[in-house]
Image (cartoon, rainbow, N blue to C red):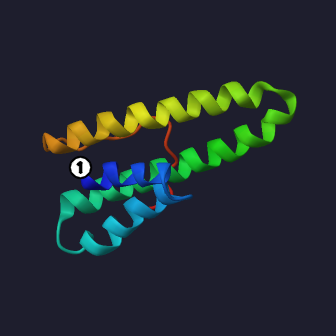
Amino acid sequence: MISHLSSLVGFIIPLGNVLGPLVVWLIKKDTMPFVDDQAKEALNFNITVLIAAIVSGILTVILIGFLLLLVVGLGWLVLTVMAAIKANEGVSYRYPFTLRLIK
């Protein structure tokens, strides 16, 4: 659960949404298999969200980016909370639309 919720650090620290899950993964990857899996999942999702936010930011030039930024932000928040709830229940959560960059 902490691996998913650690991405909320992004509200306070720039790129904290990527750094939080990265730190959890690096610390716990060898000792806790479930945390390893969920931290990688959270890290992949937050990297995907970062890419989507950058593309949306670029598209603000043609105005559609503002709507996309809103959708990306709300989707990120809702899916992060859902993942934390599932992980707290002991269920392995898979984010939809996620690039699996870290395996």
Q: Is residue 89 left or right of residue 72?
A: left
**Which quadrant of the structure image shows residue 34?**
bottom left
Residue appearing at x 30%, y 33% in the figure: 82
Amino acid type indicated by mark 1? Met
The number of discs equals 1
- Residue that numbered label 1 is attached to: 1
| x and y, in percent, of residue 17 in the image | 47, 54
Task: Specify whether residue 52 is in view.
Answer: yes
Q: Nearer the viewer, residue 76 or 34?
A: 76
| x and y, in percent, of residue 6 in the image | 35, 55
Q: Nearer the viewer, residue 10 or 27?
A: 10
Q: Is residue 97 above or below residue 46?
A: above
Residue appearing at x 26%, y 54% in the figure: 2
| x and y, in percent, of residue 10 in the image | 48, 52
As drawn, the residue found furthest toward the left would be 89
For the C terminus, the quadrant is bottom left
Task: Specify whether residue 103 is in view.
Answer: no
Q: Crowdedness of circle 1 by 10 Å Cα count: few (<14), some, many (20+)?
A: many
Q: Is residue 78 above or below residue 40?
A: above
Residue appearing at x 48%, y 54% in the figure: 12
| x and y, in percent, of residue 23 in the image | 37, 69
Q: Is residue 93 left or right of residue 102?
A: left
